[in-house]
Image (cartoon, rainbow, N blue to C red):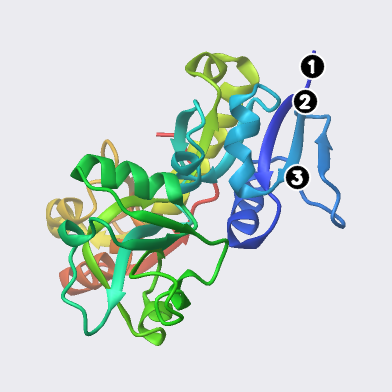
Amino acid sequence: MSMLRIAVPNKGKLSESAVDLLKEAGYKCSRSGRELMVSDPDNQIEFVFLRPRDIAVYVDNGIIELGITGRDLVQDSRADVSEVMALNFGRSSFCYAVPNTSDLTPDKFDGLRIATSYPNVVLNDLESRGMEASIVRLDGAVEISVQLGVADVIADVVESGGTLKEAGLKVVGEPLMKSEAVLIARNDSVASEPAVLTLLGRLKGILVARAWAMVEYDIHREKLEAACKITPGIEAPTIAPLSNPDWVAVKAMVKRADSNCIMDKLYELGARGIIVTDLRSCRL
């Protein structure tokens, strides 16, 4: 059986998060140095470390079956690939920005100079607006281009917005797109292969586990119905008797983001011994 090839970003936060996710899913994909390929013979997978911007192109050409990269990079590459799964990390918005003192808005960009590292994303947006502009393609430090007189507007990935503020810029208009790390394939048929189905199942298990937690607590039987409304679980909470017949033990999955508020409500209701634990993997 031939090995499945998966492209992984070769550096940066995107690479670190992708490798962490794959390792949690049981794959051996850590590099000891700067090698370009890492084999996992037990799972019949070969991980190929590439520039994030190039991954969609390799997948489109059929050299690599699957790849992990940013949605913004996929769209900018104009590669003919399918998004198989969103991976819930590397989230950002792609926005226009202008000087703080400017009254420019996206409907006034016709004929202006727009600096960006993502020319095709910008061109697609301008086309949808029926406008034309001069694209100044830069590989980095886009935010300084206005101050240096190279451009009138920039279009770039925005995470916290701190870099824009330092450059005296502000976001205008709605984001051109919302980006995050995604798993891509050349076509939908690849996703039906056994090794790929196993990979998808494992990744989904990790992503679900990251979004949920397990809460356990003891509650008086008289308060059980109210407690179950606070922690309904996926199907229903697990309820077990205690040596004290007036009390029961309850276990249920809760959204991780809500876990502290849920603990507050349970304690106010009279629950005791409340424990919230992380999940390593979970299939719903």
Secondary structure under badge 3? loop
Answer with mark 1 or mark 3, whichever residue precedes in sequence.
1
Residue 175 occupies quadrant? bottom left
- Image spot of residue 176 (x, y percent): 29, 52
Q: Which residue is mark 2?
A: 44
Cβ atoms at labels 1 and 2 below 8 Å apart? yes
> Residue 95 or 241: which is nearer the viewer?
95
Q: Residue at x 82, y 52 (%)?
A: 31
Amino acid type indicated by mark 1: Ser
- Whether residue 165 can be seen here: yes
> Residue 56 or 25: which is nearer the viewer?
56
- Whether residue 237 can be seen here: no
Kindly report the distance in space between the C-alpha atoms of the residues bearing marks 1 and 2.
7 Å
Quadrant where the C terminus lies?
top left
Kindly report the distance in space between the C-alpha atoms of the residues bearing marks 2 and 3.
12 Å
Residue 2's tag is 1
Q: Is residue 106 left or right of residue 255?
A: left
Q: Nearer the viewer, mark 1 or mark 2?
A: 1
Q: Residue at x 52, y 37 (%)?
A: 183
Residue 29's tag is 3
Residue 187 higher or lower than 116, as above or below: above
Residue 274 higher or lower than 36, as above or below: below
Amino acid type indicated by mark 2: Gln
